[in-house]
Amino acid sequence: MFREWEFLRTEMIGLILLAALLGLFVGWLIWGRRSHAAGENKALRVELDSCRTGHAQKDAKLRDLRAKLETCETDLVAAKHFQNEGQSEAAQTDLDYDGDGIIEGTDEGSKPETLTAARGGQADDLKQIKV
């Protein structure tokens, strides 16, 4: 009676081996992906830390450049103020704005006469203006 079971034993051993191999393959798929995901997660964390460090360095450089810009703007305002003071002194002593040979300074010239009505009650003949 046990002689006929040899085929059954061989079939059962084959099926057990097949189930073991299938279990190993499925386990490798599940656990292998997790280890791959863990490695990828670690790589992404390293990259994120690198980006954060670069971001902090960028912020520090930006603060430094803004401070330098404010210093330059302050220096520029001071230089313009100093230049304007020097020009106003020079203008009062050295400049002849109308070229008449008389140095009057920044207040050179006089205000032209203002009219409330036409001279002599007659309008000007604008055709006489030559271009």
Image: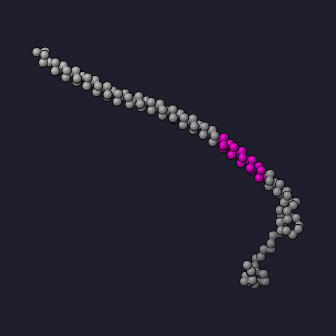
Q: Position of residue 73 (x, y in %)?
A: 71, 48
Q: Position of residue 66 (x, y in %)?
A: 66, 44
Region in magenta: 63-81
Examine the image and state in which quarter residue 35 appears: top left
The answer to whether 23 is drawn above or below residue 68 in the figure is above
The answer to whether 37 is drawn above or below residue 74 in the figure is above
**Residue at x 35% of width, y 27% of height:** 28
The answer to whether 15 is drawn above or below residue 82 in the figure is above
- Is 110 magenta? The answer is no
Q: Residue reaching furthest left?
A: 1
**The C terminus: image quadrant:** bottom right
Marker count (numbered) = 0
Q: Is residue 74 left or right of residue 35?
A: right
Looking at the image, which is closer to me, 6 or 75?
6
- Is 75 magenta? The answer is yes
Main SS category, magenta section: helix
Task: Please indicate, yes or no, whether residue 5 appears anywhere in the rendered image.
Answer: yes
Looking at the image, which is closer to me, 122 or 36?
36
**Residue at x 63% of width, y 42% of height:** 62
**Residue at x 47% of width, y 30% of height:** 42
Q: Is residue 54 left or right of residue 74?
A: left
Q: Position of residue 80 (x, y in %)?
A: 77, 52
**Residue at x 26% of width, y 23% of height:** 17
Q: Position of residue 85 (x, y in %)?
A: 82, 54
